[in-house]
Amino acid sequence: MSAPRLSPAALAGLLAVALLPWAVRLFLGDSEKYYLHLLIQILLWSFIYTGWSLMGRFGLTSLGHGAFSGIGAYVTVLLWNFAGVSPWLGIPVAVVAATIVGVLVGYPCFRLRIAGHYFALMTLALTEFVRLCIVGLRDYTGGSLGTQPKRYGDGLSLYAMQFEPDRMLSFYVAFALWLFGLYVWRHVDRSMDRYALDAASQDEDAAASVGIDVTREKLKITALSAAMCALGGAVFGQYQMYIGPDTIAGLGTSLNIVFAVVAGGMWAMLGPTVGAVFTQLLSEGLRVVIQSSGILKSVLGSAALALDSAIYGLLLVLFIIYMPKGIVGTLLERRRQARPARVARAETPPA
Amino acid sequence: MDCHLDIFFLEALLNGLLLAGLLALLALGLNLVFGVIDVVWICYAELVMVGMYGVHYAYKGGLPFIVAAALGIVLVAVAAGLLHVLVIRPVLETAPINQLLVTGGVLFFLQAAATMAFGVEFKNIGISLGSLNVLDMSFSRARILSFVVALVGMLALWLFLTRTYMGTAIRAIAQDRQIMPLMGVDSRRIYLVTSAIGGGLAGLAAGLMVLNYDIYPQIGLQFGPLIFMICVLGGLGSMIGGFVAAFVISQFIAVGSSCFHTEWGYAVAFLFFMIAIFFRPQGLFGAKS
């Protein structure tokens, strides 16, 4: 692996993110655990969102990624709880399992050219199938109540890959995963496959006629995307020390993944990350506002908890209508529009 | 896991048939909108949920049930019209997947709004039609009523689509979106009418749903995926197909639930759906494109 050349700005940005937990410790020491938890959530979901965007950017809108993250989390935890298999082995098994499922569903879809709405509905069926299997196997999975990985010792163990009590450590685990996600994204972005898939998403026949094996290309990106979501789901389970069919699998998870990426922007490297920051801050911010506001609480009562989803839903509608490229995409476009104008002016020869 | 070919198995089969009526009616409105406007309302089941709450509160407010159910139809038809004008129309010309995603935002919104307005408790309308006992088998009268109304609803829609000017225009625009506006058909109006009819059918289904199920804000997630499956499996625009698909799916659910746990019936139904689509991508009764 050749070291990717980073611009000074990117390096500074990465350093800033890496130092974030220390800033939290310094300035927000009282509620350090809470803020670190927030950062960890954002990074872990960013990784999963980035995995989804690998497919989403090529027009493969999957509602099946809740299935992949669910498989990742559940296979890992079940292997640990019932067979004593360390997550160091369990996670690769889970990732391979999710990849196989992705390819099994993807292959016929791509061969038969099931695309657009139909692909979305097909993958939605996959999500439901996996969720129902999780609930159905309640003797092992705890059904709809979810389950926990068995704690190993004091819950801090390299062998059992348990790191939840140490939030600092958890942050750097999530940070490493997030970096890996961005690396994969960049790698795909600069590969030939990206051009092939871009072409295929524009016009499949034309792409095939210039020698692109469309099915193969789509399968490759599906396998990669499914594997990333499974890995993200597995690590998420290890951090939360709890997995439930509604928190890491199921239609709700699938939709959350899709919408966060849409909000952030699926055609830019940092789009999914910004989407994660945006959705987490939105729901946490609203929660804090509601908790601290006596009026809202007395008017809405416990129903106030649903206010953030209502606003979230409304914002998504507005995003898709007015900003289909997402936050990052729109900002980049603005910048690009501003720049050529300047260049053109500079290059115009004096008359 | 006792699954024998006895009278209980027959009961499960027949109950599956009755469930199929309700599911087919639910799929009907979505099928119309999907087929004509080529838009998937991911929030379709949430529209049904809104209708269910409407019927519930209208009835609890003192209206006779039949009036409450009629109000439910109007309520959802208006909601669907608004959905089309406010949400779908602005993205009609953009990438098709945007139309699906935008209604996903509406799904979150409706679910959360229902939670805020009505709370998370399960609500029962408190009408019991009792059950019909034949031999040793028992069938819920509400299910039988749903089955009959579903058949009538489908017949009415079929007559509307084939016997009226508006119905003909709707079918025509479903066949060719580009040409029909040139023939003097106002596609904006047709889309709006289609959306309202689709909503009306959802409202009709909602009136029957409240007799069969408790209402809670997340009920859409329980039925939504099933409805999409039936729609696609039946083949777009094919009402017979929708009914057959509803029948097949409900048999998996009914027989699966009677022999195993409920989830396994559903799980097998979804698995069957995926495999069936691999063999017949256009659906059981869809025209080959």
Image: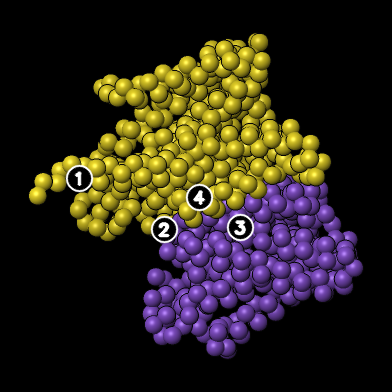
- Residue A201 is situated, as x and y percent measured from the top left of the image, at 33, 53
Residue B206 in percent (x, y) is at 73, 65
Residue to which mark 4 is pinned = A319
Amino acid bearing label 3: Cys
For marks 4 and 1, the one nearer the N-term is 4
Q: Looking at the image, which residue sits at the far front? A: A351
The amino acid beneath tag 1 is Arg
Residue drawn at point x = 20 percent, y = 53 percent: A210
The residues tagged by marks 2 and 3 sit, at their Cα atoms, a distance apart of 18 Å
Residue A65 seen in this snapshot: no
Question: In this orientation, which residue lies closer to the viewer: B185 or A68?
Answer: B185
- Residue A298 is tagged as none
Q: Colour of chain B?
A: purple
Asked whether the residues under marks 3 and 1 belong to the same chain, the reply is no
- Mark 4 closeness class: few <14, some 14–19, many ≥20 residues within 10 Å: many
Q: Position of residue A280 (x, y in %)?
A: 58, 34
Of all chains, the one bearing label 2 is B
Q: Nearer the viewer, residue A286 or B77?
A: A286
